[in-house]
Image (spheres, rainbow, N blue to C red):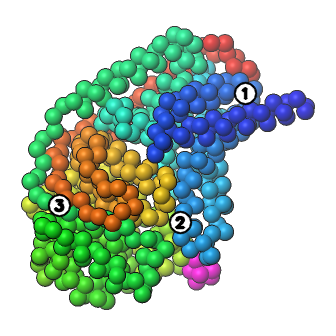
Amino acid sequence: MADGWLAGRRRGVLAFGLGAAAALGQAPLGFWWLTLAALAGLIWLLEQVPDRRGAFWTGLLAGAGYFGLALSWIVEPFLVDIARHGWMAPFAVVLLAFGLGLFWAGAAVMARLFSVRALGFVAAFVALEWLRGVILSGFPWAMVGHVWIGTPFDQLAALVGPSGLGLLLLLAAALPVVWRWRGAVASLLLLAAVVGFGLWRLGQPLPEGRDVMVRLVQPNAEQALKWDEALADKHLNRLLDLTRQGTVADLTIWPETAVPYMLEYAPSVAEMITSASGGRPVAVGIQREGEGLFFNSLRVLEGEGSEFARYDKHHLVPFGEYIPMGDLAYRWFGITAFAAQAGSTYSAGRGPVILDLGTFGKVLPLICYEAVFPRLVNAAPERADWMLQITNDAWFGVWTGPFQHLDQARLRAVEQGLPLIRVANTGVTAVIDARGRVVKELPFGTMAVLDTGIPGALPPTPYARFGDGPLAVLLVGLALLAFWSRRKAPIDGPPPPV
């Protein structure tokens, strides 16, 4: 009994360590090869587990190690007002790590239903990871396939999306476990084929962009001081000075919730903004009130401060921008959302919209973490010419969160074949072309502007046209292959010989 307990304990420690090692492939480190090796080790370890219970705990601990490290930035919002919220930080990271680790545990248990458990684990893992991005409003951050972003492998997302990148990674990890050296050869051939496709795609020319001057403003306002009433004028004047700096731009863009006032209560601010731009359009991140509700919005102003386009964020961050059952939480406990400064929470907008900005083309606006959801981008009512993400990544700290957020925006560009312009309060402010390459950027944590044109767009990609449908077909085929192969051992017996 003691020997079994010790063996299980050692297996748990190893699983946790493999999960943590796999997280090192995420930005900013990008050690994708370490993620690949760690997942191969985890799949091998699951082959040694004697029963469902052991598989569950092995998967759970591996997932907890992975998410605990990859999402360690989650403590940062609690440290903005440390006296009030700091005590929640350790609970947040532990609960999130083990909560998301349940998806890995589920895949480990489901794998035991298949004759070829390693391939069954791959199919179950990718399916459950896709589900993670959907249920309970969805949280597709730190998907394992994100480790490919910034390499030629990421071009596969134009065909099969982010879950397809995860399928590639896990298949490459599983094949050597199933078929030893023959599987290793097959894995290398698979990776070589995808690299070849990626290099070919990256080598193709891009269409000409729009010959306009767009100014991206990065004010670098410290989150802890951003809503200090005594500093409101200082923060607004900083934005105005950056807007009027040098040659006047054709279009100026400010980041999420950049304006420390609401136009409903301070209408003169709109005229101050367009005066700084010489009457030319300025897209500002700002809070808005309408019919007693408050919104996190993008408003495009021009002329003498008139508004000609607007978007209200529709996919809100749970606990960050709204609290489930928020009215009761506020009335009974005084709990408010971290990011919502107007009222206790924000209200959701109508849904994805395309803003027609005339000379500047049709744009799909995304506010903050809306850019991490590929399905939201695919749900746009029509094809845009480019995408615009405004964000306040000061909430995510300075180490990992902002760079992971940038990577996911890059992946949306690959998936859609559309350029994406990203404007962030503290960074990373960047211009991303239609194949996901960063062509211009501002240093993180600096106050500066970036003047740019608008890169050209590609025709709709297969993923833009068909979404996750092709991936579903691939997963069903893999699951059937793993299930119908001749079973060598009972479901809860020792692993079959390979």
Q: Tell me: residue 178, above or below residue 340.
A: above
**Cα–Cα gap, marks 3 and 2:** 31 Å
Q: Which residues are magenta?
A: 328-335
Image position of 286 (left or right of 28): left
Image position of 45 (left or right of 255): right
- Is 264 magenta? The answer is no
Magenta stretch: dominant secondary structure: helix
The residue indicated by pointer 1 is: 49
Q: Earlier in the sequence, mark 2 or mark 1?
A: 1
Q: Where residue 225 appears, x then y in whole percent?
A: 46, 77
Q: Residues within 10 Å of mark 3 (few under 14, many from 20)?
A: many
- Is 334 magenta? The answer is yes
* Element class at badge 1: loop
Residue 77, label in figure = 2
Nearer-the-camera pick, 239 or 349: 239
Identify the image quadrant of the C terminus.
top right
Examine the image and state in which quarter residue 444 appears.
bottom left
**Cα–Cα gap, marks 3 and 1:** 57 Å
The amino acid sitting under disc 1 is: Val
Residue 92, label in figure = none
Tell me what residue is drawn at x 53 percent, y 33 percent: 35
Callout in the foreground (3, 1): 3
* Element class at badge 3: strand
Q: Tell me: residue 273, above or below residue 316.
A: below
The residue indicated by pointer 3 is: 214
